[in-house]
Image (cartoon, coloured by chain):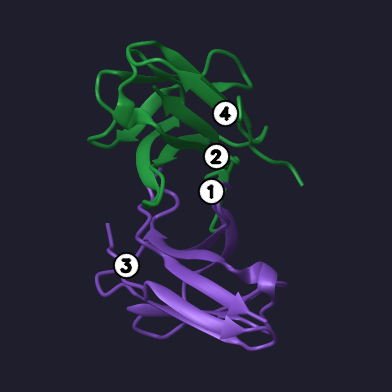
């Protein structure tokens, strides 16, 4: 079964540094998402992306965050200047968006630790 | 977006049937109901999705009454490996927008 893959599985960075989290969505999917989950808390929506532009974003997704689909396969989340509170699991998801059954398929996440 | 309410936690024993009910009183006409399972340090995994009545797949059943203001995920004969957090989400999957996760139900299956 095709799956969403994320790299790296764990990223450690110092406060103020830029990080790029990478995702390869399922190949025929058209809708892409980033969610995050702070340890012990619920999964939070960050941003959705379709047709090379952001469809919707949450209050968390401020100017420090950006997303990009640099080629036909990758979908990236960039955090420009990391803060301690950005430490979390970051999940990428994709969906086909077609028909009546197009659930989100999630990757296994990147654990970001900001020190 | 429709808000969902689920029990925070449930306990069960191996071999039992588990039913987790989710309330979504302000569900919209175009909203679908989707359930996800999440193990620690893993991404949420799609279980089942429905619009009305009953949906069944190889792992679960989803019961949705006529008014669609609630739904019940039924897991037959649970095993220890079903210990996880279960999320009920409501949204228009065709909208290209966000799906909001609630707190979920932490299911603990005991031997």
| Residue that badge 1 annotates | A104
Q: Which residue of the protein is positioned furthest toward the right in this rendering?
A: A1
Q: At 63% from the left edge and 75% from the top edge, which residue is drawn?
A: B60
Whether residue B53 is visible: no
| Residue that badge 3 annotates | B4
From the top left corner, tell me how far across and down residue B73 is, in percent: 52, 77
Asked if disc 1 and disc 3 are in contact, CB closer than 8 Å, the reply is no
Spatial CA distance of label 1 from label 3 is 18 Å
Q: Nearer the viewer, mark 1 or mark 4?
A: 4
Mark 1 crowd level (few <14, some 14–19, many ≥20, 10 Å Cα) = many
Q: Nearer the viewer, residue B79 or A61?
A: B79
Labels 1 and 4 positioned on one and the same chain: yes
Asked if disc 1 and disc 2 are in contact, CB closer than 8 Å, the reply is yes
Asked if disc 3 and disc 4 are in contact, CB closer than 8 Å, the reply is no
Q: Nearer the viewer, mark 1 or mark 3?
A: 3
Spatial CA distance of label 3 from label 2 is 22 Å
Which of the two labelled residues, at mark 1 and mark 2, occupies the earlier sequence position? 2
Q: Circle 4 marks a residue in which chain?
A: A
| Residue that badge 4 annotates | A10
Whether residue B45 is visible: yes
Q: Nearer the viewer, mark 4 or mark 2?
A: 4
Give chain A's shade. Answer: green
Determine whether the residue tagged by mark 1 lies in a helix, strand or loop. Answer: loop
Q: Which mark is residue B101?
A: none
From the top left corner, tell me how far across and down residue A73 is, in percent: 63, 22
| Residue that badge 2 annotates | A94
Mark 3 crowd level (few <14, some 14–19, many ≥20, 10 Å Cα) = many
From the top left corner, tell me how far across and down residue B12 is, in percent: 56, 84
């Amino acid at each position: 079964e095709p799956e969403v893959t994320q790299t790296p599985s764990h990223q450690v960075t110092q406060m103020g540094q830029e990080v790029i989290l990478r995702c390869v969505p399922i190949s025929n999917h058209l809708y892409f998402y980033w969610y995050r989950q702070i340890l012990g808390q619920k999964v939070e929506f960050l941003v959705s992306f379709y047709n090379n532009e952001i469809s919707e974003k949450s209050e968390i997704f401020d100017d420090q965050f950006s997303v990009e689909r640099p080629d036909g396969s990758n979908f990236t989340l960039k955090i420009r200047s990391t803060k301690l509170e950005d430490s979390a699991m970051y999940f990428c998801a994709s969906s086909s968006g077609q028909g009546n059954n197009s659930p989100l398929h999630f990757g296994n996440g990147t654990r970001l630790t900001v020190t | 977006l429709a808000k969902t309410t689920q029990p925070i936690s449930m306990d069960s024993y191996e071999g039992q049937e588990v039913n987790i009910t989710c309330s979504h009183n302000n569900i919209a006409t175009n909203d679908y109901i989707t359930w996800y399972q999440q193990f620690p340090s893993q991404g949420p995994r799609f279980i089942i999705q429905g619009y009305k009545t009953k949906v069944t797949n190889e792992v679960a059943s989803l019961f949705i009454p006529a008014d669609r203001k609630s739904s019940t995920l039924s897991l037959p004969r649970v095993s220890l490996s079903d210990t996880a957090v279960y999320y009920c989400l409501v949204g228009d999957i065709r909208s290209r927008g966000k799906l909001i996760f609630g707190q979920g139900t932490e299911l603990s299956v005991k031997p």
